[in-house]
Image (cartoon, rainbow, N blue to C red):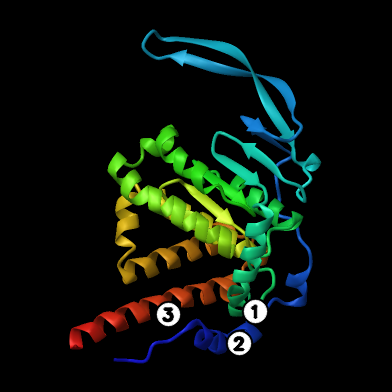
């Protein structure tokens, strides 16, 4: 049986990789992801304006059309303080920035030290600042094909998201009740509790929820890339189930990273694909190697 490899070994191999794939001085400069001047919201914790909007309705059966006036809520993006917690819900997405309770943050920052060492970056699991929070919201706004997602920044809501599995129409219609019970409950509780106490970012396909703790744009983009990947299908549980196979797991991670690089990240952050997403993919390669190595070892015995 081949020797088992650990994260410590991988970290040593990645040191020269980081040396040659860091950002240039130009890439280190502060930047802002572009946002529209205003966002039409269904619900929000932010101050908003109300305005009338004329819409055209038609009845194709009767051959009739008429105009109605409706009120809509509008948030001016220039007035958003991205350093503070807030919530925005639109027709396409729900964006929530909040903090976990203090004890779990203390545990999380401690247990995230191996991840910081692996990526050699204190921004890993640190929590998103104002600049990265703006970037995360911009990723949603600038990608209209990202729909029906909840993006949580710097926190999670494990039990609430599990409750949503059985009460939110878009989730109940997408996956059958058995899949939501047998796969959804363990993933909603297990993954989100793990995320809270390690401050690790992840995507849960059955709750359509991405949780992001890292102050790194490409990691958020990667989780949104998972959402884009799963959105190709009419249900999620089958693709989730096949993830148990190491080749499928690697495929899903690679697709999410490529979508992050090509479709979601600002071009100025393209360097982050090599700096963060390739090392992250290497951890999955390591996991796949150790799984296959263990299986082959059992067969020989």
Mark 2: few, some, or many residues within 10 Å (few <14, many ≥20)? few
Mark 1: few, some, or many residues within 10 Å (few <14, many ≥20)? some
Task: Judge whether residue 226 can be spotted in this image.
Answer: no
Q: Position of residue 79 (x, y in %)?
A: 80, 40
User: Looking at the image, is mark 3 or mark 1 earlier in the sequence?
Assistant: 1
Tags 1 and 2 in contact by the CB under 8 Å rule? yes
Q: Which residue is mark 2?
A: 15
Q: Which residue is mark 1?
A: 120
Label 2 secondary element? helix
Label 1 secondary element? loop
Q: Position of residue 40 (x, y in %)?
A: 65, 32
Q: Which residue is mark 3?
A: 286
Q: Position of residue 75 (x, y in %)?
A: 72, 34
Disc 3 to disc 1, C-alpha distance: 18 Å
Q: Quadrant of the N terminus?
A: bottom left
The residue at 59%/76% (across/down) is 114
The residue at 59%/57% (across/down) is 212
Q: Quadrant of the C terminus?
A: bottom left
């Amino acid at each position: 049986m081949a020797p088992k490899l650990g994260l410590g070994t991988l970290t040593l191999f990645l040191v020269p990789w980081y040396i040659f794939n860091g950002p240039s001085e130009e890439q280190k400069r502060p930047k802002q992801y572009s946002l529209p001047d205003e966002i039409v919201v269904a619900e929000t914790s932010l101050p908003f304006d109300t305005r009338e909007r004329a819409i055209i309705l038609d009845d194709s059966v009767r051959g009739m059309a008429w105009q109605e006036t409706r009120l809509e809520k509008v948030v001016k993006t220039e007035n958003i303080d991205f350093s503070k917690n807030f919530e925005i819900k639109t027709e396409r997405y729900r964006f929530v920035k909040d903090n976990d309770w203090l004890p779990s943050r203390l545990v999380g920052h401690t247990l995230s030290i191996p991840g910081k060492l692996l990526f050699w970056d204190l921004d890993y699991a640190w929590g998103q600042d104002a600049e990265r929070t703006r970037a995360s919201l911009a990723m949603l706004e600038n990608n209209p094909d990202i729909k029906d997602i909840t993006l949580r920044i710097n926190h999670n809501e494990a039990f609430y998201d599990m409750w949503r599995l059985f009460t939110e129409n878009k989730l109940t219609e997408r996956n059958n009740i058995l899949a939501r019970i047998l796969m959804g409950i363990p993933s909603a509780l297990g993954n989100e509790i793990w995320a809270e106490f390690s401050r690790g970012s992840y995507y849960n396909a059955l709750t359509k929820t991405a949780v992001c703790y890292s102050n790194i744009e490409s990691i958020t983009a990667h989780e949104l890339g998972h959402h884009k990947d799963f959105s190709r299908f009419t249900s999620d549980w089958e693709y989730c189930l096949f993830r148990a196979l190491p080749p499928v797991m690697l495929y899903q991670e690679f697709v999410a990273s490529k979508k992050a690089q090509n479709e979601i990240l600002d071009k100025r952050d393209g360097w982050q694909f090599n700096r963060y997403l390739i090392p992250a993919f290497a951890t999955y390669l390591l996991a796949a190697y150790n799984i296959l190595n263990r299986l082959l070892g059992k067969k020989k015995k």
